[in-house]
Image: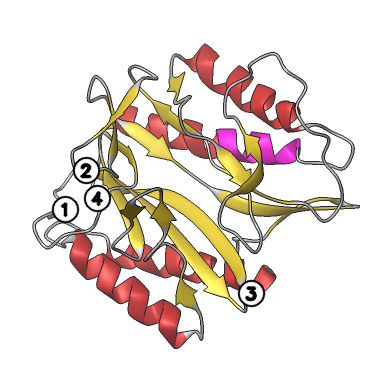
């Protein structure tokens, strides 16, 4: 798990220098696949099945009002002032790594920077609650109590998750508090915690490609994700170099 997630962190770190106006999401995806293979791992998303759907790419590249699962194409060209969420999955020796980061393309408006920072800080605050003896709901409540008073909404139809030999395992990790206790957290559990927030509605819909999820009102969305391990000394962030 540590190596799978270290490789995901390499991708998320190095891809930042490649995100600039005029670059296509296809170029980013091609680079990421070659880099992952060069590190003796495999893309974790490419070929991933959900029902009858098969994901066709290495990265999810979600621009502006796209929340998650944006499919890279040659036609999607980044523009000055865009934001793009990069989500990457990695398989190493049968175990999954998973992480995401939202990047500014060139200069973005100050209010967009605040949206991104709020989401990034919410992830850190949620991770602080991923401790032995706490419950999944402690993570959810911490994120909710930080984000919503700032005037942002939290996407409810998509959640964090357990992760290990499978990309998605129990438990679900809600990014909003639903009033339920949730599963107790124990040492050696590994979780992908990933708040998704918007400057508009929490409601989302899926495009005709059957993958790309967008905000229902086309408001901007930010998404950050770390895979963490619960240890006797608190949470260990695995997707960090």
Find the distance from the CA under tag 1 to the CA under tag 4.
7 Å
Find the distance from the CA under tag 3 to the CA under tag 2.
31 Å
In what element is the residue under mark 4?
Answer: loop
Would residue 19 be counted in the magenta stretch?
no
Residue hosting label 1: 78
**Magenta region:** 122-129
Q: Is residue 241 visible?
A: no
For residue 157, above or below residue 84: above
For residue 196, above or below residue 32: above
Earlier along the polypeptide chain: callout 3 or callout 2?
A: 3
Label at residue 53: none
* Circles 1, 3 touching at the beta carbon (< 8 Å): no
Label at residue 82: 2
Residue pictured at 23% horizontal, 51% vertical: 106
Q: Quadrant of residue 133?
A: top right
Find the distance from the CA under tag 2 to the CA under tag 1.
7 Å
Is 148 or 26 nearer to us in this picture? 26
Find the distance from the CA under tag 1 to the CA under tag 3.
31 Å
The x, y position of residue 128, in whole percent, is 74, 39
* Circles 1, 4 touching at the beta carbon (< 8 Å): yes
Earlier along the polypeptide chain: callout 4 or callout 2?
A: 2
> Is 35 displayed left or right of 228 in the figure?
left
Marks 4 and 3: which is nearer the front? 3
Instruction: Provide the major secondary structure of the magenta segment.
Output: helix
> Is 137 displayed left or right of 121 in the figure?
right
Earlier along the polypeptide chain: callout 1 or callout 3?
A: 3
Marks 1 and 4: which is nearer the front? 1
* Circles 3, 2 touching at the beta carbon (< 8 Å): no
Earlier along the polypeptide chain: callout 1 or callout 4?
A: 1
Residue hosting label 3: 3
């Amino acid at each position: 798990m540590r190596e799978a997630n270290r490789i995901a962190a390499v991708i998320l770190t190095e891809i930042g220098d490649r995100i600039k106006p005029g670059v296509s999401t296809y170029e980013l995806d091609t680079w990421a696949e070659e880099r992952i293979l060069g590190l003796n791992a495999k893309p974790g998303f490419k070929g991933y099945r959900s029902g009858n759907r098969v994901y066709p790419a290495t990265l999810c590249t979600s621009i502006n009002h796209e929340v998650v699962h944006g499919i890279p194409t040659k036609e999607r060209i980044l523009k000055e002032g865009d934001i793009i969420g990069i989500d990457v999955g990695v398989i190493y020796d049968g175990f999954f790594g998973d992480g995401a980061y939202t990047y500014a393309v060139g200069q973005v408006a100050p209010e967009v920077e605040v949206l991104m920072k709020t989401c990034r800080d919410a992830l850190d605050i949620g991770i602080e609650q991923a401790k032995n003896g706490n419950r999944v709901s402690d993570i959810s409540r911490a994120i909710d109590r930080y984000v919503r008073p700032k005037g942002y909404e939290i996407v409810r139809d998509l959640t964090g998750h357990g992760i290990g030999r499978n990309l998605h395992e129990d438990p679900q990790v809600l990014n909003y508090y639903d009033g339920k206790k949730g599963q107790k957290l124990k040492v050696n559990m590994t979780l992908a915690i990933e708040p998704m927030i918007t400057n508009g509605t929490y409601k989302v819909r899926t495009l005709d490609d059957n993958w790309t999820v967008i905000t229902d009102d086309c408001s901007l969305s930010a998404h950050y994700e770390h895979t963490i391990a619960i240890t006797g000394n608190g949470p260990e962030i695995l997707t960090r170099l």
